[in-house]
Image (tube, helix red, strand yellow):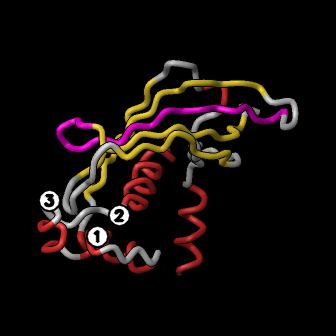
Amino acid sequence: MTIDIVADLKSRAVERKRGNTFEWFSVGQELIHHWGRTLTEGDNTLFTTLTLHYNPLYTNADYALAHGHTGAVVCPLLLFATVFGLSVEDLSEAGGPFLGVDELTYLRPVIVGETVYARSTVTDTRETKSHPNFGIVTWHTTGFDETGEPVIKFNRANLVRKAQ
């Protein structure tokens, strides 16, 4: 019975293309990444513990309040990883090596419980002779809060597969 169900599901499955190819991107193109993410106390506590970020600003709301914040501060590396992750579906999900991040700037502390969103702008596309099935795409990504205030910005680049 189970084998019949699996075979039926496989026969009806439709392969869905993931990500975008090099040719899809153009300089100046803006992508608004659609999900957003609320950074919870659990996220922050687990991340700071697993990465050994024991700054009390990240785990002690009283300490953060005493130092001028309105609550515990989200670990900056968690903020970066979250905003970067929000962009993956649109920018690099099709595969291709990650080439790096430049000009990472934290614009203000994010407080536990805030929701962050992301958008990216294509700043450069170029061919590469060393990997003819790929091109290099560079994006400027900005993370912002629910009011639209920027909280983080950075540039990143990837080798992006070309359409075959």
Query: Where does the image place residue 9, in percent across and percent down from the top left?
Result: 53, 63
The overriding secondary structure of the stretch rendered in magenta is strand
Inspect this view and state whether residue 91 appears.
no
In this view, the residue in front, 72 or 123, is 72
Q: Earlier in the sequence, mark 1 or mark 3?
A: 1
Give yes or no for contact between labels 1 and 2 (Cβ–Cβ under 8 Å).
Answer: yes
What is the tally of numbered marks visible in this picture? 3
Query: Where does the image place residue 59, in percent across and percent down from the top left?
Result: 26, 75
Q: Is residue 146 magenta?
A: yes
Q: Nearer the viewer, mark 2 or mark 3?
A: 3
Query: Where does the image place residue 85, in percent across and percent down from the top left?
Result: 46, 52
Density class for disc 3 (Cα within 10 Å; few <14, some 14-19, many ≥20) is few
Instruction: Look at label 2 and name its amino acid.
Output: Cys
Task: Report which residue position mark 2 lands on.
Answer: 75
Q: Secondary structure at mark 2?
A: loop
Task: Report which residue position mark 1 lands on.
Answer: 58
- Above or below 54: residue 21: above
Q: Is residue 110 left or right of residue 65?
A: right
Measured in 3D between alpha carbons, the distance from the residue under mark 2 to the one under mark 3, in whole angstroms, is 16 Å
In this view, the residue in front, 25 or 137, is 137
Q: Earlier in the sequence, mark 2 or mark 3?
A: 3
Q: Secondary structure at mark 3?
A: loop
Density class for disc 2 (Cα within 10 Å; few <14, some 14-19, many ≥20) is many
Query: Where does the image place residue 84, in percent across and percent down from the top left?
Result: 46, 49
Measured in 3D between alpha carbons, the distance from the residue under mark 1 to the one under mark 2, in whole angstroms, is 6 Å
Instruction: Look at label 1 and name its amino acid.
Output: Tyr
In this view, the residue in front, 28 or 64, is 64
Instruction: Look at label 3 and name its amino acid.
Output: Gly
Please provide the residue range marked out in magenta: 132-149
Q: Nearer the viewer, mark 1 or mark 3?
A: 3
Task: Report which residue position mark 3 lands on.
Answer: 68
